[in-house]
Amino acid sequence: MNYKFIESDGELKNVCADLLKEKIIGVDLEADSMYCFKEKICLIQIATAKQAFLIDPFEIKEVSPFLKVLENNDVIKIFHGADFDVRSLDRDYHIKVNNLFDTEIACRFLGIKERGLAALLKRNFNVDADKKYQKADWSKRPLKKGMIEYCVGDVAYLTKLHDIIHKKLVAKGRLLWAKEEFQIQEQVRYENNHSLPLFKKFKGAGKIDNRSLAVLENLLQLRIKIAEKKDQPLFKIISNASLMTMARKKPVTIDQMLEVRVLSPKQTDMYATQCVQAIVAAINLDHKVLPSYPRTRRPKKDNSVEERIKRLKKMREKLSVTIGMEPGFLLNNALIGSIAFKKPATLKDLLKIEHIRHWQGEAIGSDIISSLG
């Protein structure tokens, strides 16, 4: 596909004026989460049926013309796996994408198991997508020729892919179902994972004692401080596994740190002293000020609820085959638990349950009610 770099604010304004006349455009973003502490959008790709445009946010001072295109309700924006893109756009530009069509979500309604963009391009257009640059550093300039070809390839077929998937959704009578999910996807927002205490979003933190939790929190805060100073992602400083091992083992000298073998020789030289200091500080905390992991009180086990969960899961597995949608997408376990606990007697009651979709009520609502007995 022909592509064009947008190199000035005036050029972007003119291109976006033309984009507003389009019915459908493809959109994708490239970011630098693998290379920087504070992730940012590094490139914006747009494609009509005939041409692709590349917007470099490092060069363009005023991106508002493009943001107006994203917010416009009359232009369908095609994304593939839009969650990351929608959150990134909210984080960097505080805007909401309207009239979104997510080809990955749409595939779920069609029972397509291989939903990666590369698989879809191969299946529908016999195109072999080169994913060599999927984890490239998109913050670096100039962009390599291969990187440009890669990012253009990610949007070049989106409008054609939309046409194919749209027809299949209409044929199956599932277009409105998919649109409900698209509208929910439009509402997602960026969440800052660096809010204190950091352990609240750390996998496994709920399984360790309070003293270990204090050690973990000190180490997490130390890692963020180092990562921000070096402008590197957290995983490139110290891995999560190493932090958890240190929280459990609590090495209080460099020798003990070496014995535990949680840091590489290079990491030991750079971070071991600071890690030991963080661990010792947590060990010396008074018991009264130790952090505790927030617990959600689980309802007392109810045999009748457990029985309803079993029936709902059995129903889900059966309907997954007949409807042709993956079980976890058709009805996830969290919803099954809520439905079993609340035991709605009518479809109206079912739709009052948080996170239940109207399309689920239409597709399997009567089956859910009958399964509850």
Image (cartoon, rainbow, N blue to C red):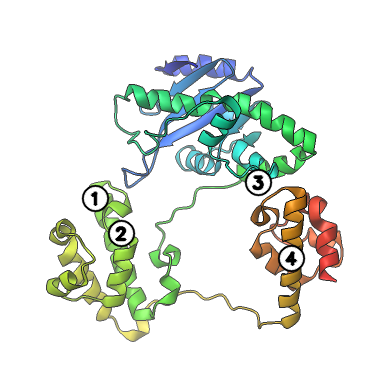
- Label 2, label 1: how far apart the Cα atoms are: 17 Å
SS at mark 4 in the image: helix
Q: Nearer the viewer, mark 2 or mark 4?
A: 4
Q: Nearer the viewer, mark 1 or mark 4?
A: 4
Query: Which sits in the foreground, 241 or 63?
Result: 241
Q: Name the residue under label 3.
A: 184
Q: Nearer the viewer, mark 2 or mark 1?
A: 2
- Label 2, label 3: how far apart the Cα atoms are: 33 Å
Q: Name the residue under label 4.
A: 314
Residue at (49, 74) in percent of width and height: 294
Task: Determine whether, in the image, residue 38 is placed left or right of residue 184.
Answer: left
Residue 181, percent across and down?
A: 68, 45
Query: Which sits in the foreground, 193 or 305?
Result: 305
Q: Name the residue under label 1.
A: 229
Q: Which of marks 3 and 4 is in front?
A: 4
Task: Determine whether, in the image, residue 358 is placed left or right of residue 99.
Answer: right
Disc 2 marks a residue whose amino acid type is Ser
